[in-house]
Amino acid sequence: MKLVLASNNAKKLAELKVLFAPLLLDLVAQGTLGIAEAEEPHFSFVENALAKARHAARKSDGPAIADDSGLCVDALGGAPGVVSAHYASVALPPGDREVQRRVQDEANNRLLLERLHNRDDRRARFVSTLVALRSADDPEPLTALGRWEGEILRAPRGKGGFGYDPLMWIPSLSHTVAELPAEQKNALSHRALAARQMLQLMREVWHLG
């Protein structure tokens, strides 16, 4: 079964391909089908994920899945939240998309540290909401939610992962997310938690696997 991912993020695609491997799905990024990214005007992860999934399903005329995820920091009232990927305003260099993402990530991390300066409460969580649809007009979206609790460090550590991973300290592991091997991150992350829920829903409701 071909399932369109409503994202052009290569690292997110790679993560989800591993997580959905048990169902033998053919997960393809919407960009490979010429589908532009959808607008994300909403204030919650679930609303944005649903909007992206419906857009991808409509343009591909088939099933689609979307992930809307981000970082929620208690001391900032849940920010950066749904704007996590573009938290900081920054001029991006032309050209390679992955280079642009790295520049944006670095700016986001700097801004987060500035806004948490001298704050003792560093509690935060990564949140992932997955929404899957059989078609654009599917009245029964499958929805799964994963949360990964941690704390924001005062300086980045680690070279792996992407986004806020170098700042997200997981106390139970004594490492940042950026210091974890990819296999361990894929097994424990917010996206992994949401994906396991989604796998079960797809088996029960869509009768896959």
Image (cartoon, helix red, strand yellow):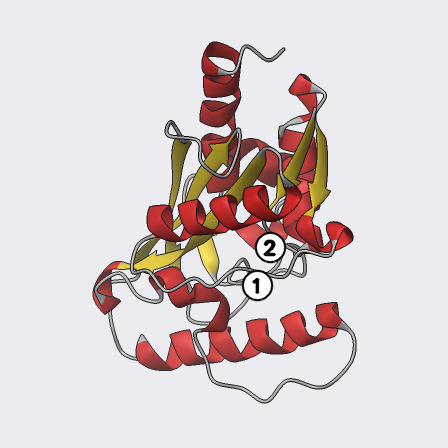
Residue 178: give its label: 2
Three-letter code for the amino acid on which mark 1 is drawn: Arg
User: Could you tell me residue 144's position as x and y percent?
Assistant: 40, 32
- Distance between the alpha carbons at the discs numbered 1 and 2: 7 Å
Residue 182: give its label: none
User: Could you tell me residue 132's position as x and y percent?
Assistant: 49, 34
Up-down: is 147 above or below 109? Answer: above
| Residue plotted at (45% across, 19% down) | 201
Q: Quadrant of the C terminus?
A: top right
Label pair 1/2, CB-CB below 8 angstroms:
yes
Secondary element at image label 2: helix
User: Could you tell me residue 22's position as x and y percent?
Assistant: 67, 18
Extreme residue in the bottom direction: 91
Q: Which residue is mark 1?
A: 157
Up-down: is 87 above or below 11? Answer: below
| Residue plotted at (78% across, 74% down) | 96
Lower sequence index among marks 1 and 2: 1
Question: Dot 2: few (<14), some (14–19), or many (≥20) neighbours within 10 Å?
Answer: many
Up-down: is 7 above or below 200? Answer: below
Q: Quadrant of the N terminus?
A: top right
User: Could you tell me residue 47's position as x and y percent?
Assistant: 34, 49
